[in-house]
Amino acid sequence: MKKLIGIIGLSIVCGNTFAGNTTVTTKIDKLYSYAEQGIFDGDIAILISNPPVGCEGGYWLRKADTLGYKNTLSFLLSAFHSQTTVSLSGNNNELWSGSSNKYCRLDQIALMK
């Protein structure tokens, strides 16, 4: 019985850990940068043509609390200018408050060949 309870508990924790993650392979259509907008200073909005369900606006990135902000921004700019296909992963439980559209917080970007 203890093993069964442990397995159920572990599956609940693991299920919640990954609930809300979204991934899409796409090209970046537009990038918006927000300056002097209060809490949105340095935020980047990423618009794509085929956003996943729950992220219909696209993705967003916050400068203030993203340790890999400079690296991620470099990848975004490179992909945008070269029109390289990217894989974007984000969290639809962290929607951007800077828009009424659903922008998911960007967690990862991968450039594809």
Image (cartoon, rainbow, N blue to C red):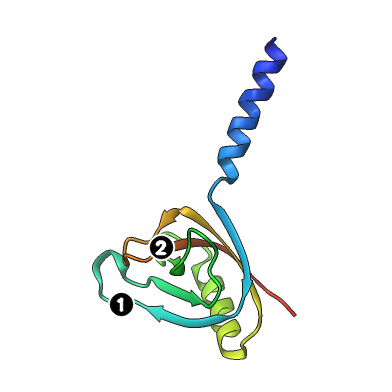
Q: Residue at x 40, y 57 (%)?
A: 95
Sequence-wise, the earlier of marks 2 and 1 is 1
Quarter occupied by the C terminus: bottom right
The percent coordinates of residue 54 (x first, y second) are 48, 58
x%, y% of residue 39? 28, 64
Q: Is residue 26 above or below residue 102?
A: below
Q: Three-letter amino acid code at disc 2? A: Lys
> Is 75 placed left or right of 47 in the picture?
right
Q: Kindly identify the residue that appears in the image at 57 percent across and 58 percent down.
A: 22
In front of the other: 7 or 39: 7
> Residue 35 shows which numbered tag?
1
Residue found farthest to the right: 113
Q: Residues within 10 Å of mark 1 (few under 14, many from 20)?
A: few
Q: Residue at x 64, y 24 (%)?
A: 8
Observer-side mark, 2 or 1, equals 2
Q: Could you tell me which secondary element the residue under label 1 belongs to?
A: loop
* Foreground of the two, 44 or 52: 52
Q: Quadrant of residue 99?
A: bottom left
Residue where numbered disc 2 is placed: 102
